[in-house]
Amino acid sequence: MSENKIAIIGLGYVGLPLAVEFGKKVHTIGFDINQLRIDELKNGYDRTLEVDSENLSSSTRLSFTCKLDEIKEANIFIVTVPTPIDKNNRPDLTPLLKASETVGKVLKKGDIVIYESTVYPGCTEDDCVPILEKFSGLKFNTDFYCGYSPERINPGDKVHTVTKILKITSGSTPEVAEKVNQLYSSIITAGTYKAASIKVAEAAKVIENCQRDINIAFVNELALIFDKMNIDTLEVLQAAGTKWNFLHFRPGLVGGHCIGVDPYYLTHKAEEIGYHSQVILAGRKINDNMGAFIANKIVKLLIKKGAKVNNANALVLGITFKENCPDIRNSKVIDIIDELKEFGINVHVFDPMADKHEVKKEYGIDMIDRPEGKYEAIILAVSHKEFEQLNLKEFSNSTSVVYDVKSILDKSLIDARL
């Protein structure tokens, strides 16, 4: 470990916590193309809120840069960039391939490149390695080597942090696999699991999120069925949950940059080899339609109460993709908002966790500083801790509809929940 110099490519929710932990042990360089991000980190501020200033300062062997020349000295490169989808739900490998190009320009004989980004099986060796070879002029598994160790970061989770989550590792040769495993073992207190190959590690990661997506889709479909039967889904799940082997999933919006995205990577690869997914894509279709279902339910409740719909005011509490996290990427709350607007409803969005400028840039929404006045509809979309202090009665009247997407409010305070 003492001879290694590590460069972390991409300093988001995954890369930064990893860089901080390695930086406590060995010479580590955090690289990101965003100069503002680098400046903030140098000043001890992490806008993702994953790492506090005290933890940042404790990583005494960590430096930050956006200059390519400053990562040349590294002999291990760890790529932690996003792997999004495009508007047609197809994998967008642009960040990954650009990062590979960056690493290829500084790659030397004997170096190891480890990928952590979630991809489909075969992506590392079939898509990334050729880029590394092209820009380095070196030959794979002769001059340089690769590893794959999928990230398992849970944004906003202060209990299951990077060192406390068991890490899958793999390498392009048995010797490199062992080196990669030992590297991560030096910081991961929860332990490591050495997969049989890079493709196995890639597949293991992508099915983790597919499995969760399908399980949530199942309870979302139950919510759709029970809504028509006028049965409370949460009460059904609580009753069924008394069985020892019942799986405890809750209905909800499935967004973010993992669960709502990764299944499309696997189904894309499956289609390339001639298999058309049925279960995985069916689950995706159900989950992607939940925002529209919620909005339509709210409109029906407004009509039933005799409240106006056109030009009504609705308060949406939360725009991030999950609770107690500032990340707004692929938030499915926007589906509720867009559908409500289709009915002529004025939507006011309040989220103290989200950055106003990012929300404006991503979704074209001007968030309010605080709720004021009365609203015909109030939607608790994200269960931030800050919302626990809100008195919803202050913003509602006798015909207001209160919808609890997260099913955390007392049943007596709401008109419906998912």
Image (cartoon, helix red, strand yellow):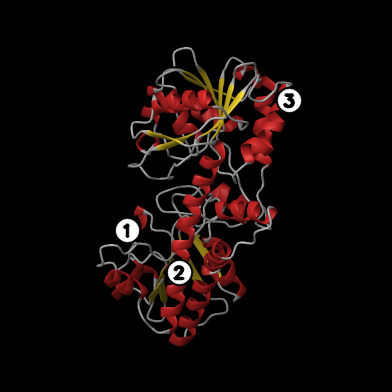
Mark 1 is on which residue type? Glu
Which amino acid type corresponds to the residue marked 2 in the rendered image?
Asn
Q: Which quarter of the picture shows residue 232?
A: bottom left
Q: On the image, numbered disc 1 is attached to which residue? A: 388
> Which residue is found at the position 74% from the left and 21% from the top?
137
SS class of the residue under badge 1?
A: helix
Identify the residue position indicated by label 2 in the image. 220
Q: CA gap, disc 2 to disc 3?
A: 46 Å
Q: Residue at x 46, y 55 (%)?
A: 351
Instruction: State which tag comes first along the sequence, 2 or 1.
Output: 2
Residue 264 visible (yes or no): yes
Determine whether the residue tagged by mark 2 lies in a helix, strand or loop.
helix
Marked residue nearer the N-terminal end (2 or 3): 3
**Residue 373 visible at all:** no
* The furthest residue to the top: 3
Callout 3: 10 Å neighbours few (<14), some, many (20+)?
A: some
Residue type, label 3? Phe
State yes or no: discs 2 and 3 in contact (Cβ < 8 Å). Answer: no
Residue 75, percent from left and from top: 57, 18
Residue 214 drawn at (x, y percent):
48, 62
Decide: few, some or many residues near mark 2? Use Cα within 10 Å; few <14, some 14-19, many ≥20.
many
- Label 2 to label 1, Cα distance in Å? 25 Å
Instruction: Give the mark nearest the N terminus, 3 or 1.
Output: 3
* Camera-side residue of 126 and 323: 126
Q: Nearer the viewer, mark 2 or mark 1?
A: 2
Q: Residue at x 60, y 25 (%)?
A: 145
- Residue beneath disc 3: 135
> Is residue 359 positioned above or below 43 on the image?
below
| Left or right of residue 309, residue 186 in this image | left
- Report the side of 377 relative to 363 (left or right): left
